[in-house]
Amino acid sequence: MSEDFYEVLGVSRDADADEIKQSYRKKAAEYHPDVSDDPNAEEKFKQVKKAKEVLTDEDARAAYDRMGHEQFEQAEKRGFDASENGQDPFGGMGGMGGGQGSPFDDIFEQFFGGGRGRGQQGPRPGRDLQTGLTIDLEDAYFGTARQMTVTRPERCDDCGGHGHPEDAEARTCPGCEGRGQQVRVQQTPLGRVQQTTTCPQCEGEGELYSETCDSCDGEGVVMEESTLTVEVPEGIRDGQTLRMDGEGAPGEPGARDGDLLVEIAVEADERFERDGDDLHITHPISFPQAVFGDDLRVETLDGTVSLDLPRGTQSGETFRLRGKGMPRLQRRGQGDLFVRVQVVTPENVNEEQRDALEAFAEAGGEDIDVKEGFFEKIKRSL
Ligand SMILES: [Zn+2]
Ligand SMILES: [Zn+2]
């Protein structure tokens, strides 16, 4: 497989660019998979193209001559690997990594912008797309199924995602000689390093077609609005992301589709404060209830439950109702409900209540300098 490029093209080591190109054309015609009977035609065709590409690039050829065939290939491979893993220290276009950007990326930008090098592994898988969904606490408690309308890229039906009509004629892209990538050799402090970028002319296809698909302008995808049902499981928390398999951008024909990532926002609730799977609520009680105790009915997200309020409860005391909080996501059980009772002081009392309270104070030996209330003032002025 790995043969010396000069031998592949059948030229001498000091052949000039014209000689190389001439020889390339001959060999390419000979091994073109469409015309050649050679069972290894495709592989040979690729080798010929590769050899020509390297030897007609002044920098690449110099590196090749210096390193020799094997070392050059290894260096190149490392270069590809780096860009595929997004670790290319030299900031090549190929370093975007796969799909998962920040959750704030625009859904369109994710699809159309940037771009991952095609690598040499065939059709590109579809990108993951991201969107958001806001629900209230009750939906988070019971779980919910929500219809959501998303505008997203879909595979173009008219061309099956190929971007060109089936009968369009293909020719090898001149920008990358069919490789889909352009190789650049750069001098860096670490030595010569190869960078690969997706060929802008063919966008990594390696081929150009006589016609492009009218429906999708050759993109292979069209933007379409579609309605999806998002199943939100009970117990989901604010900021968690649901992954909908295969609902992202379509992959190139033969590759897998991306996923749709739905980030869930759970709105704050007026009554309940959430702390993980626990809930907190403040429940008003009267002074007599605080003194005598009572059987309280406390609100939960799923009806009311009883709370056995003991005698002599202080305002601000907190009671824990086990298992009355949020359902635990994908686990059994529920968190707890913490009920903080608050003694509510009446702002106005009627005469009967006032007399009773005065008697209460007196019986306790309290000497209160009672402030005049609204009614007292009116009475006195009569
Ligand atoms: Zn199309
Ligand atoms: Zn190209």
Image: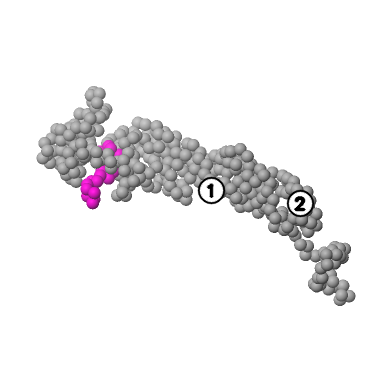
Instruction: Classify the position of the N terminus by image quarter.
Output: top left
| Residue at 45%, 49% in the rendered image | 102
Depth check: 191 or 246 in front?
A: 191
Q: Which of the two residues, 317 or 146, is positioned nearer the viewer here?
A: 317
- Looking at the image, tell me whether mark 1 or mark 2 is earlier in sequence order: 1
Q: Which amino acid does label 2 sit on?
A: Pro
Residue 188 in the magenta stretch? The answer is yes
Horizontally, is 377 left or right of 5 in the view?
A: right
Picture quadrant of residue 222: top left
- Mark 1, other Cα within 10 Å: few <14 / some 14–19 / many ≥20: some
Please report the residue visible at 73 percent of the width from the left and 57 percent of the height from the top.
314
Q: Which residue type does callout 1 highlight?
A: Gly
Q: What element carries label 2?
A: loop
Mark 2, Cα crowd under 10 Å, few <14 / some 14-19 / many 20+, is some
Badge number at residue 310:
2
Q: What is the magenta segment's predominant secondary structure?
A: strand
Question: Along the horizontal axis of the image, is 59 left or right of 89?
Answer: left
Q: Where is 194 relative to 122, above or below?
A: below
> Where is residue 101 shown, x and y percent of the image?
43, 47
List x then y, in percent, for residue 98.
Answer: 39, 42
Say above or below: 75 vs 189.
Answer: above
Classify residue 275 as left or right of residue 249: right
Can you identify the residue that label 1 sits on? 239
Can residue 57 be seen here?
no
Residue positioned most to the right: 382
Between disc 1 and disc 2, the foreground one is 2
Magenta range is: 177-196
Where is the C terminus found, in terms of image quarters?
Answer: bottom right
Residue 101 visible (yes or no):
yes
Say if mark 1 contacts mark 2, CB within 8 Å: no
